[in-house]
Amino acid sequence: MGGCAPPQYGFAAPSLPVGNPSDGGSLGDGEAIAIDGLSKHRWLTFTQTEACFESHLNDLRAEDILPKFDFILMGFRDQTQPMANVPAIASSRVTVKSSGQEKVVTQERAFGLAHVVVEVCFDNPGRVVTPATSYVVLRVPYSVDSDAIGGGSRDGVWRLTR
């Protein structure tokens, strides 16, 4: 035996259960919390022409959000599907909605933690989210160790229910 297994996504973040929107399922209003415990994602809309998400990303400022870095929407049949076989599309539009600082107080000191809220949209999401899709991942290009097993620390994960 030998050889390397094909790279897989780690699904380390908890997945938020929602209805499969390609079957008319409800997205609800819950937030998918990323591995970092700070980044939060809401799935706002899904139509055949566009899907949009709202992402609250900590430790980033508005000027950190660069057009050259695409968010990626991925649709998995199951958790064992190799990354090379997963349908994926790049964001068509990323809009900064707000940014600022939250006051964080520790025993040692108080400091400001920067955050930015962005709306991320994808054209023709039916290429990724189909009736056969079980998991949807919003890959965040500003994640730490985004190429490591387990994926990015700021990614959002949804488990589609039937």
Image: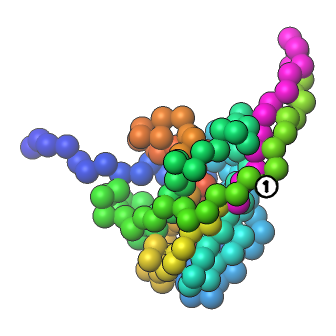
What is the magenta range? 106-119
In the foreground, 20 or 122: 122
Residue indicated by mark 1: 97
In the foreground, 53 or 62: 62
Q: Residue at x 60, y 45 (%)?
A: 66
Is residue 117 on the magenta stretch? Answer: yes
Q: Residue at x 74, y 53 (%)?
A: 96
Q: Residue at x 35, y 56 (%)?
A: 83
- Residue 38 is left or right of residue 158, and the answer is right
Judged from the image, the secondary structure of the residue bearing numbered disc 1 is strand
- Residue 4 is left or right of residue 91, and the answer is left
Location of residue 63 in the rendering, given as x and y in whole percent from the top left corner? 70, 39
Q: Quick one: which residue is furthest to the top in this view?
A: 108
In the foreground, 121 or 53: 121
Location of residue 143 in the rendering, given as x and y in whole percent from the top left corner? 56, 40
Instruction: Give the residue type that dot 1 points to.
Output: Lys
Q: Evaluate whether residue 143 shows in this view.
A: yes
Quadrant of the snapshot with the C terminus = bottom right
Q: Evaluate whether residue 38 shows in this view.
A: no
Q: Residue at x 86, y 11 (%)?
A: 108
Magenta stretch, main secondary structure class: strand
Location of residue 7 in the rendering, given as x and y in whole percent from the top left corner? 31, 48
Please identify the quarter of the rendering in which residue 94 is found: bottom right
Quadrant of the snapshot with the N terminus = top left
Location of residue 21 in the rendering, given as x and y in whole percent from the top left corner? 60, 81
